[in-house]
């Protein structure tokens, strides 16, 4: 077995990466709210097409703020964000698509699963026949084909999140942004959805930015973890998780997994101490 001393470097300082085809470029982007709260110091971050990148850090470190800036839901106070070399607002010109999965499913309770998933296509004016075919495909991808006509109240929390993911996939995105989508679920359901998400990521060749508070989830899912510290939010370290895919439950009880988890735990503690000292 390879000893830690023989292992390749797992951490590097957060300097902008250069890729031939970056999916996401955050270029000295920062955010200060009208009340004067500085949510993010200037952030520089590049994400390669096809990466699975997780944002990790203590509460209040700006993970969701950064994700919403990438999505175009929040404007940076200064700096720029590009998707496939285009400003976020010009994403359509690149021929690429983006989808956002929120912390809660945000489903229409009166509408069927099928109708909930079809919503973004209806809003975009996609013809019904094409829309229904894409809904059928999306529901099959998340394992809900048999529940197309069910109402959300008939589904478990995990199944409702699957509907939310299907609603994102139905737009056939290239970039999938996920803001703690499984945080409220029990561990068994969460681990199952994590594994399913990795299958979808590999099958659809997605670029994913995922926000979580869970070290174990970050190690299991990610090709790279970006650690953030708060008040004001900033990137402090990055970690490459070089374990091969597909990753199974066996990986989660391996020495390699424990080693990565320890690295992230130590980094998170450093980020949290840094936060406390800043507040003091």
Image: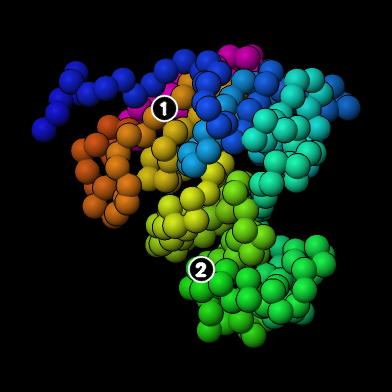
Which residue shows up at 65% across the image and 26% down it? 26
Q: Who is closer to the viewer here, 257 or 148?
A: 148
Crowd around label 1: few <14 · some 14–19 · many ≥20 (10 Å): many
Image point (21%, 38%), residue name: 255
Label 1: which residue?
239
Earlier in the chain: of badge 1 and badge 2, it is 2
Residue 163: x and y in percent read: 61, 68
Residue 12 at x, y = what percent? Answer: 42, 18
Q: Which residue is mark 2?
A: 142
Q: How many marks?
A: 2
Q: Which residues are the magenta region?
A: 261-280
Residue 82 in the image: state x and y as whole percent.
Answer: 69, 31
Residue 255's label in the rendered image is none
Which quadrant of the view contains residue 263? Answer: top left
Observer-nearest residue: 192 or 199?
Answer: 199
Say if residue 118 shows up in the picture: yes
Estimate how packed mark 2 is, as few (under 14), some (14 to 19) or many (20 or more) residues with alpha carbons within 10 Å: many
The residue lying toward the viewer, choosing from 215 and 168, is 168
Numbered disc 2: secondary structure: loop
Magenta span includes 121: no
Q: Secondary structure at mark 1?
A: strand
- Quarter of the rendering occupied by the C terminus: top right
């Amino acid at each position: 077995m390879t000893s830690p001393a023989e292992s390749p470097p797992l951490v590097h300082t957060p300097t902008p990466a250069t890729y031939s085809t970056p999916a996401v470029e955050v270029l000295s982007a920062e955010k200060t709210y009208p009340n004067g709260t500085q949510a993010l110091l200037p952030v520089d971050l590049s994400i390669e097409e096809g990466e699975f990148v997780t944002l990790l850090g203590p509460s209040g470190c700006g993970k969701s703020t950064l994700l919403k800036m990438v999505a175009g839901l929040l404007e940076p106070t200064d700096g720029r964000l590009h998707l496939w070399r285009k400003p976020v607002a010009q994403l359509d010109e690149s021929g690429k698509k983006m989808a956002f999965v929120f912390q809660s499913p945000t489903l229409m309770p009166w509408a069927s699963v099928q109708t909930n998933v079809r919503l973004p296509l209806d809003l975009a004016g996609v013809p019904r026949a094409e829309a229904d075919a894409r809904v059928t495909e999306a529901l099959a991808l998340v394992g809900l084909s048999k529940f197309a006509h069910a109402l959300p109240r008939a589904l478990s929390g995990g199944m409702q999140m699957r509907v939310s993911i299907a609603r994102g996939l139905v737009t056939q995105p290239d970039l999938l942004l996920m803001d703690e989508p499984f945080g409220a679920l029990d561990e068994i359901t969460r681990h199952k959805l994590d594994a399913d998400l990795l299958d979808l990521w590999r099958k659809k060749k997605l670029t994913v930015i995922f926000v979580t508070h869970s070290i174990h989830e970050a190690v299991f899912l990610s090709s790279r973890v970006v650690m953030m510290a708060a008040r004001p939010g900033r990137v402090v370290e990055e970690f490459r998780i070089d374990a091969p895919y597909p990753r199974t439950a066996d990986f989660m009880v391996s020495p390699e997994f424990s080693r990565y988890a320890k690295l992230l735990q130590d980094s998170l503690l450093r980020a949290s101490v840094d936060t406390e000292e800043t507040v003091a």
